[in-house]
Amino acid sequence: MNKVQTVFSLLFIASMLAACSQKGKSETDSSLVKPSVDIHTAVLYGNLAAVKEHIAYGTDLNQKEPLGGSTALISAATFNKIAIAQALIDAGADLSIQNNDGTSALHAAAFFGRVEIVQLLIDAKADKSLKNNFGATARESISGPFAEMKPIYEMMQQQLGPLGLELNFAELEKSRPVIAIMLQ
């Protein structure tokens, strides 16, 4: 076999292996049904089963919602959907994608005081040095005094409360220094 044939043989084998290892719907697998609810809605409603259907179906876990550009993982971090965040991380969701404001899943988890999700992201090797559009890392975004940030949290609660955002201000005030230490 000459070098050209060897290269083409290796490329063919590599492409076949890649095709066989891809998650998602295949032409011969009729058991996979497209999920009835989009992945972002599933996250907001805490519908882990639907998120798992999306993972099995091969939905792009990194697709951004059109309004703010958040991924399913960023939304899971924002809305404290721990089991969903874990499922997305385990399925290979990109930890470094940022929304329109430059917020990554780690920024969102830190900012909203989601200690468990921050730990999941740290364990998954999320990049602590990523900066948002305001030039702040996740740690820097929570380093200021809570009293200065409380009006922003109140505004976020008002805007995102109808979508299910729940913020306990006393818990949030306590968790910010803990998360700052975790992110050192």
Image: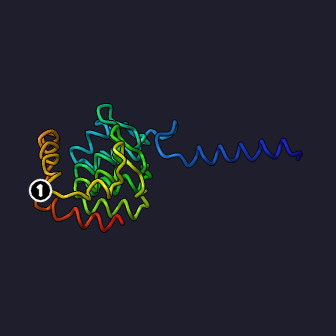
Q: Can you give x and y, in whole percent of width and height, for residue 55 in the image?
A: 39, 47
Q: How are the residues colored? A: rainbow
| Residue beneath disc 1 | 168
Q: Can you give x and y, in whole percent of width and height, for residue 161 in the image?
A: 13, 43
Q: Can you give x and y, in whole percent of width and height, for residue 92 in the image?
A: 44, 52
Secondary structure category for the residue under label 1: loop
Q: Decide: few, some or many residues near mark 1? Use Cα within 10 Å; few <14, some 14-19, many ≥20.
A: few
In this view, which residue lies farthest toward the right? 2
In this rendering, the answer to whether 110 lies above or below 153 is below
Q: Left or right? Give the position of 27 relative to 70.
A: right
> Which residue corresponds to the image point at 28% horizontal and 45% vertical from the top-left?
75
Q: Quadrant of residue 163?
A: top left
> Which residue corresponds to the image point at 30% horizontal and 53% vertical from the top-left?
84
- Amino acid residing under circle 1: Asn
> Which residue corresponds to the image point at 34% horizontal and 62% vertical from the top-left?
120
Q: How many marks?
A: 1
Q: Can you give x and y, in whole percent of width and height, for residue 19 in the image?
A: 59, 43
